[in-house]
Image (cartoon, rainbow, N blue to C red):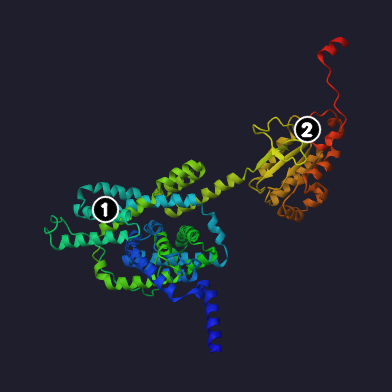
Amino acid sequence: MQVITSLRRASLNMSARLFGAWVREITPSSLRADALAGLLGAVLVLPQGIAFATLAGLPPQYGLFTAVVPCIIAALFGSSRHVMSGPTNANSLAMFAMLSPLALAFSPAYIQLALVVTVMVGIMQWLIGALRLGSLANFISPAALFGFTSGAAILIAVYALPDLLGLAPASVHGAASVLSHVFSQLSQVQPTALAVAAITALVAWSVHSLKPSWPYMLIGLVASTLLAWLWLKWPGSVLPTPDTALRTVGQMTTPWPRFEIPRISWSAVPELLGLAFALTIVALGQSISIAKAVAARSGQRIDPNREFCGQGLSNIVGGFFSCYVSCGSMNRSVPNLQAGARSPLAAVSSALLLLALVALSASLLAQIPMAALAALLLLVAVGLLDLKRWRQLFQLSRTEFAVALTTLMATVSIRLEMAILLGTLLSLMSFLYRTSKPAMRSMGFDGWSPERQFVVLGNPNTERLPECPQLKLLRMEGEVYFGASQHVADTLYALRHQLHPQKHLLVMGKSMNFIDLAGAELWEAELSARRAMGGDLYFHRPRPEVIEMWKTTGFTRVLGPEHQFSDKRIAIATIFPKLDPLICKTCTARIFWECKSLPPLAPKPSSDSTATAT
């Protein structure tokens, strides 16, 4: 018995290291809760999987398979207990926009390209996690991601129009081309398709408004599919005879994901790598955002590197089992948490239950009208266009608003991978611009009390406070790196070349968090310039990271340890004897305690005494 217990404990420890600490917390109660939450997840993803696969230019079963295989692997090997992975609207649209110029959507060649890109995305994601580069996700600006999502919403609506109106698919790619195709074919709009789409949207929207917890997309699909079936089977018995047959999803070739090695020409690999990189950015941005949002509600800690490894493995394996690029799905993850899921086994049960649903209802799924799917995609697009957030972004930050708007326009007008990279680049440029001009504030004292503090000069409350004519007190706020060194150098140059320059400079370095080689060289040049004009350079409370860089470059030796102070009183007491006594003798500012030791100023002669002397 003891041996069995030891083996069981060792097995649990190994499983916990592989999958996570949740393995030790499995109980009959938690299994029951995960199974119920999994059932809800399976029902929710059934219509989404079909709709998103259509949006991606793939047969419907690929969307369902993507909700099965990647969902299981990402749940078991990721870090979140509640995130469910699978097809998403952004990934689907991005894949379609990137691959449709290379091959005809829904064609065998297109499918093979999609599977290969999925494997490439998985490898890139896994490498990011394995090399512990998860912090790179922090450089994906929320504004750029929001702009891309909003642009994707517009494209989703545009690409759904032909099916919504019962028109033949556009033979060319691009939002403008699709719109042109739709306007040129308006005379051929099918009232049948339009009616089915309207009923789908009305039912789904009504259910979502009245019962938000219900699977509104599934209910809308069921209602419209039943109506279309009655309409076509018994024309005239329910509604007027339709003018033409509705296009439907059609029979699935197989209800089970099967192993298949993707096949493409090696000459296409270089171009696909660029597309895979852009898709990786989209997927990682979504995954980490969703994982953090769900973790904020559950109180769970997320490990970005483990999360990326799990997502990467799910796409690598999924690419060999008829799955396209997947990531965490907000539409399934939040309901999964709210349904009481306690572990990743909820995602596993959801995937297995979905397989059972597909196997049992394959013939019924084939009857779903394409117009109904287009209506659901239109609802998704409307939900993604968050106008309230646009207004909030405009009020809070015009720069972030400009980044989001530019990314939106680029998403609609140019290739999606370029739009994503452009948005990310704009975000980094805006960050670099903000940090390239660190604040450099003149400081003074707020009074003569023993505990008096440094205060910033120049605002309405302190603009009349005097400064020492020989010692400049300057607070440095921000990083002095290669991008900021020119701004800092220009500011220091202006201080040295004003009409009556202060020869000595005491820099408050507590908020100077980081310097690089360019920053170290800048301070060395400032030290030389100050000493050349008969003054000197001093630092108050420089940070340990800054001191370490100075030691590495040799600046500490040139500056001298006696020029670094941990206390402002000691700093000023040490610098004061080095000031020019002749200037101090006639100075009227006298802001330091040490100034009290100076002889009193001679009174200025009055105008009356001057006249008498004359």
Quadrant in the rendering for residue 593: top right
Residue at x-position 54% and y-position 65%: 305
Task: Quadrant for the C terminus, please.
Answer: top right
Q: Nearer the viewer, residue 214 or 20?
A: 214
Q: As displayed, is residue 272 above or below residue 68?
A: above
Residue 194 percent across, percent down from the top left: 23, 52
Residue at x-position 39% and y-position 63%: 87
Question: For the residue carrying disc 1, how many other residues have a C-alpha within 10 Å: few (<14), some (14-19), or many (20+)?
Answer: some
Residue linked to disc 2: 469
- 166 left or right of 478? left
Quadrant in the rendering for residue 505: top right
Residue 267 percent across, percent down from the top left: 44, 65
Q: Amino acid at mark 2?
A: Pro
* Nearer the camera: disc 1 or disc 2: 1
Residue 290 percent across, percent down from the top left: 46, 59
Residue 367 visible: yes
Q: As displayed, is residue 266 above or below residue 588?
A: below
- 514 left or right of 140? right
Q: Amino acid at mark 1?
A: Leu
Q: As displayed, is residue 258 above or below residue 555?
A: below
Q: Nearer the viewer, residue 4 or 424?
A: 4
Residue linked to disc 1: 202
Helix or strand or loop: what does disc 1 sit on?
A: helix
Question: For the residue carrying disc 2, how many other residues have a C-alpha within 10 Å: few (<14), some (14-19), or many (20+)?
Answer: some
Quadrant in the rendering for residue 356: bottom left
Instruction: Quote the CA–CA distance across marks 1 and 2.
Output: 76 Å
First in sequence: mark 1 vs mark 2: 1
Label total for image: 2
Q: Are marks 1 and 2 in contact (CB under 8 Å)?
A: no
Helix or strand or loop: what does disc 2 sit on?
A: loop
Residue at x-position 69% and y-position 44%: 476
Residue 149 percent across, percent down from the top left: 42, 52
